[in-house]
Image (spheres, helix red, strand yellow):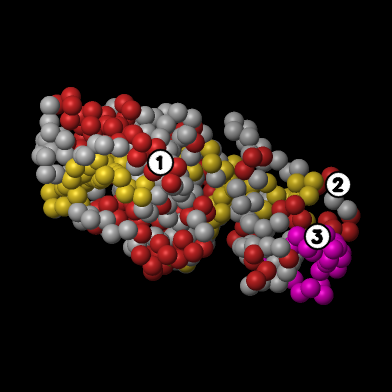
Amino acid sequence: MKGFVPTPPETVDGMVELLFRGRPPGPDDRVLDPGCGTGAFIDGILRWCAKHGRPLLRITGVESDPRHVDVLRRRFDGDRAVEIVPADFLLSEPGTYDFIIGNPPYVAITGLSEDEKQQYRARFVTARGRFDLYMLFFEQALAGLAPGGRLVFITPEKYLYVDSAGPLRRLLAQYRVEAIDLVPEDTFGELVTYPTITSVRNAPPGTTRVSRRDGSPAEVDLPQDGSSWLPALGRPIAQAGGVTLADVCERLSCGVATGADQVFVHAADRLPVELRPFARPTVAGRELVPGSTTIPRRNVMLLPYDAKGRLLAEDDLGALGRYLTQDEIRGRLLSRTCVRRKPWYAFHETPMLQDMLRPKILFKDISATPQFWVDWTGDIVPRHSVYYLVPPDLHALRVLLRHLESPAAHEWLRENCQRAANGYLRLQSRVLQRMPLPDPVLSELKAGHPTPWPAVSPRHKKRGALVEAIPR
C-alpha cells in the first residue's frame, strides 16, 4: 500500500503493551492490524503472548500490497492464530474486533487519484478538505471496534490540530480517548512525522492522559466540537479580554500566488524600462534572513492589476501585454489551472492590493523561530511564502510588532502552530488570527485612538480579519 512506513520493534512492543494494559486478551478475543505491511505488529503480539505466558488470540492482518502479502504468507504460514486477508481495508467491511493496532499509511490527498478522492469522500465523514489516508483508517477501524474494545495507532500528530482533521476529532471525541503519547521525533529515523500514539477505547468519553515530548505528563479534557486539541495538550497561555489579533487588523493573510512566478517575478536591476510602471518590489520567504530586520528589494513583481486590485483590461496592458503575449510566456500562462475560470493573464489568486499596499508586518510561512519584518513604505508585494498583517494605523503596527516579538507571543505560537520538519513552525494566518491579545496590549492600542474601543463580535469580522467598527 502507498504510504507504508516500517515501525521499529521497540515501538511495536510499547504499543502492544498499551493495547493490553489492564485487560489481558483471552483466547477468544480478536485482534486486527488493518494495514499490516510485513507483519511487525503481528510479530509483536506473538512476542507479548510468549513473554506473558498467555494463550494465542486470533490475529487478522489486512494488507493490499501483493508484495507484502507474499511476505506475510511465508512468515505466518502454518500459524493457526494468524489470518492474512489480501484486501483494501478502507473498501472492505471491517468486521468486529476486541483489539485493533497498527501504523496506518500516511498518504496526503495529493498522493491520491481523482477516483480515489471521490470514492473516499463518498464513504467517509473524515474525508473532508485536505485529508490524509490515516485519518480514514481511524474511522474505518473505530467502526469495527467492539464495545469496550481498544485501538492503538501510531500516526503523524497533525490530526490533533489541522482543520482537515476536524471531522476526525469530532468522531474520536465520541469515544474514550485514553491516551495521547507524543513520541520522539526520530522514532522513524530521518522520516520526521512528529509521531503520536493514540489509545482509544469504545466507551463513553472521559479524561485523556497526555505524555508530551519533553516527558511531562498531563490529564486533559479534549474539546468535542472538532476544534484543535493542541491548546489542551500543551500549556495554554491565559489571556484576558477575548480580543484576538484578527479583531484589530485590517487584513492578516497569505501573500500573492501568481501561478507563474517565472513570468511575473524579475530581478529589479534587469527589468526593461518599459515594464517598470507595472512593477512593485516583492519578497519571498527564503529572502527574509533570520536575525536581520532588512527586507530585500532585489526582485519585482509585474502586476496586471490597478492599485485597488482590479484586473486591467487586456487593451490597457500596453508594454506588459506585449511581453505576456510572447508565445512561450503566453503558453506558460495558459497551462495554469486558474485560466479555466479567469482571464489568461490573471494571477492564480486575486491580489488584495488595496489592503496590501500599506505599511504592514511580514513573516515567513515556515520558520525555526518566529520573526517579524516591517514594510514601513507599504509598497512591497509579499509572495505566497510570506504572510502579511495590516494594522489600522502606524501606532497599532508598532504596538502589535512589540507584542509579536515578545516571549509570551512566541510561547503561544509554539503551543498553537503546526510543526514542519526539524522543529520548524508553520506560521499560518488562520492560527495567528486566533492569537488572543492581553489587556496591556489592548490598553496600548486604545491609547492611540480618541474614541472608546468597540465591543468585539464575530459578526463585525469581514473575511475573518477586518472589524468595521475599529475607529480610524
Q: Is residue 209 visible?
A: no
Q: Nearer the viewer, residue 273 or 209?
A: 209
Of labels 2 and 3, earlier in sequence is 2
Give me the disc on residue 70. Answer: 1
**How far is disc 2 from disc 3 in space, using C-alphas?**
18 Å
Q: Nearer the viewer, residue 91 or 131?
A: 91
Magenta highlight: main SS: helix
10 Å crowding of disc 3: few (<14), some (14-19), many (20+): some
Residue displayed at 86% across by 47% down: 270
**How far is disc 1 from disc 3 in space, using C-alphas?**
51 Å
User: In which quadrant of the rendered view does residue 154 lie?
Assistant: top left
Provide residue 137's location: percent of width, then percent of height: 34, 51
Residue furthest to the top: 51
Compared to residue 296, the image places residue 186 above or below, namely: above
Residue receiving disc 2: 270
- Is residue 187 in the magenta section? no
Residue displayed at 50% across by 56% down: 112
Closer to the observer: label 1 or label 3?
1
Q: Amino acid at mark 1?
A: Asp
Compared to residue 32, the image places residue 10 above or below, namely: above
Highlighted magenta segment, given as a residue range: 308-333
Residue receiving disc 3: 329
SS label for mark 1? helix
Closer to the observer: label 2 or label 1?
1
Provide residue 460's location: percent of width, then percent of height: 41, 67
- Is residue 309 in the magenta section? yes
Labels 2 & 1 near each other (Cβ < 8 A): no
SS label for mark 3? helix
SS label for mark 2? helix
